[in-house]
Each structure stands twice: as structure tokens, then as C-alpha cells.
Image: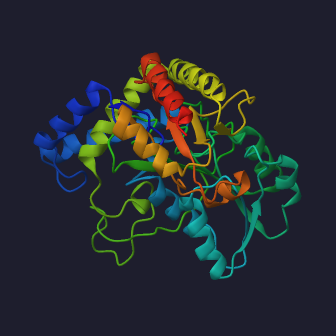
Amino acid sequence: MIYLDNAATTMRKPEAVTQAVVQALSSMGNSGRGVHGAALDASRVIYETRVRLARLFHAPDPARVVFTANATQSLNIAIKGTIGPGDHVITTALEHNSVLRPLYELQAQGARLTILPADSLGRIDYADMEAAVRPDTRAIVCTHGSNLTGNMIDLHRVGAIARAHGLLLIADASQTAGVMDVDVQAMNIGILCFTGHKGLLGPQGTGGMVVAPGVQVRPLLTGGSGVMSYSRTHPQQMPTALEAGTLNGHGIAGLGAAVQFILNTGTQAIRDHERALMRAFYEGARAIEGVRIYGDFEAQERCAIVSINVRDYDSAEVADALQAQYGVAVRPGAHCAPLMHEALGTAAQGAVRFSFSYYNTMDDVHAALAALRELAAEE
């Protein structure tokens, strides 16, 4: 299989990730639920992973790195834990349903929502963002990179708008964490939400948040914490306040190994490799008659994603043919990004997404292009 569906999940991981998970499965106890060696070992591994993530994201305090099951859970905690009825929120048409659906729920409960439109290349206008700020604006919630077009939002610029108006910035780094440079302090990010199984090269079922000092988040879940067991209320100290229940220690062990691999390798090296693959595929695909490509490829920074359509074929039909005839695995359909498809005019057809990772090769690119040429030539 030529796996080009890395925006959904990276399939190939560093060998150290597998080793860390296997070791944890046979040795790890429950962190914070005992003083024996196995429990203490779990606490050590989990803490070391917090430290590595804090280093990767330039966060000042590892205790404010919170673990969740995925970015969807992180975004639900961040959005529902900071925004309420009467609050105004600014977001964009680039967003995944993990942002949109929680915001729609809050809108039904009395929050107010402004969604910035995207142009035909999937770009927003930052002047529109600043113009949308009102006296009752509480937060800006936006993605760092579109999972459909690969277009990126300039978080330095958005963070400056948030800082100027005293707003909370909640950023979705699902497509960028581990590949793009993310500095929560320089970007003025109040809550960074990430998943572990994509660019961070970790196991599925891992994710988290980085919560800036001074930002208060109402917990989505309360319950067992391992501390203050006689209190009727959940502990308020971080990270326990947002981590009710047993953590996925085995997955976090693998995530810790993955983050260490990224720190050792460097995000620049990872980004350069992925960009070279993406650019080679883009240049090859744009030369194929009948292929339409979506997104802004003139931008200096973008995710390693190329979404296309072939003539008027349904995107699922193209993806099925790529898999069945050529062994090329891609993602068709709506990609949980309905507003982005509306902006691109692809709501009915969907799009075929090719997404690259550090473990893909130029041979993968050439094979995918060869398959695409044959499909596009069919009448």
C-alpha cells in the first residue's frame, strides 16, 4: 500500500513509539493511584511526556499540558469550558466539525457566532477578523492548518489581534503539531488543542491541550482524580482539574517517544521533507488534464496536503479506483469541513485528499501521479 492519508492519521510511526507502548503495556500501573513502583513508573512517563510537549510548544509550565483522547475532546473542553451564553466568538470557514459543532451547540444556548468567510482559494481576510471584534467578543477559535486545502492561518497575526483586544485564542493544531513551529507564548495562544496520532507520530487515542497561565477552563468531566478523594468537588489544580479518570498511560508512553523523536529530528527537517513531497505531487498533478486542485499554493507556509478532483467524477469513485487498481490510499468526501467545501464549490463532489508524512518517499509521489494520470485519461 502507498499510504497517502496522513492527514487522517499517520500509519507509520518511529520504532521507538512501538517499543514504548509495548513496554508500558507490560509494566505500567495507574498514575496517581498508588505509591508502588508500577504506579510511580506511570507517573514518571506521563510527566516526562508533559515536559517534552511543553518544550515542543514552548509552553512555560508542563503542569499546564493536559492529556485527552484526541483533538475533538480537547476542543470540546476548551470551547465549552470558556464560552457561555452571551459571549461572542469569532471563527472561520476553514474549521473542522470538531470546532464548528461545539460552537453551534453554544450558539443554540445563547452564544453569538461570527464565521469569517473564505475565498475561492480557501483563504480568510485578517481585516475581516479584526473588524468582527465587538464589545462582547470573548474568543477567537481557529485552526492552524486546514485539513482540506492545507492552507494555514497565521497564528502570529491572529494572536496579535487577540492580544490587542484582550481575547482568548483557542487554536486547533491537529494538522500542524509536530511539523510546523508552534510557540504558544509568541503566538499568544490561550489554549492550544492537538491530537497525538497525526503529525506528532503517536498512537491513536492520545491528544491534549496547552493552557496558558491565567486561563481558567471549566472541566467537561469530573470524578476520580487520585487526590482529595473526600472532597465533594473535583480538584482545581492543573493538570488534574481537566484530567478526570485514568489516563491512557500506554498511549501517552508512545506519544512521549514520538515527541522525543520529533525533538531529536527537528520540525524543520520534517517540514522540509513533507514540503518537497507535497510540492512534487502538486507540480505533477497540475499538469494532468482534467485534474482540479484546491487551495493556495503560493503561500510560504502550508500543510503537506493536496486536494483534487478528476473531471466530474465523484471523489469516492476516484479514491476507490486508486486503492483497488493501484494500491494508493487517500481520503475522499467532505473531510468534516462543510464550510470549506461550500467556499470551494465542492459540496456535492467532495474532494480527493493526498496527504504526506515524514515517512513517505518520492517513489510514493511518482506512483500516485502515475495512477492519477491513468485515471484522468479514462473517459
Specify whether 220 is left or right of 18.
right
Q: Is residue 99 above or below residue 371?
A: below
Q: How many marks?
A: 0
Q: Where's residue 319, x and y in %?
A: 45, 44
**Foreground residue among 20 and 37:** 20
What residue is rendered at 89% in x and 57% in y? 131
- The residue lying furthest to the front in this view is 379
Specify whether 371 is left or right of 345.
left
In the picture, which quadrant includes the N terminus?
Answer: top left
Q: Where's residue 176, x and y in %?
A: 55, 38
Can the viewer see residue 113 in this picture? yes
Can the viewer see residue 48 in this picture? no
Q: Give the quadrant of residue 8.
A: top left
Q: Give the quadrant of residue 284.
A: top right
**Foreground residue among 118 and 76:** 118
Specify whether 115 is left or right of 98.
right
Q: Is residue 134 above or below residue 42?
A: below
In the picture, which quadrant includes the C terminus?
Answer: top right
What residue is rendered at 29% in x and 67% in y? 224
What residue is rendered at 45% in x and 55% in y? 238
- The residue lying furthest to the bottom in this view is 109
Identify the image's colour scheme: rainbow, by chain, secondary structure or one colour.
rainbow
Q: Where's residue 318, x and y in %?
A: 48, 44
Q: Where's residue 11, x and y in %?
A: 34, 36
Q: Is residue 227 above or below residue 302?
A: below
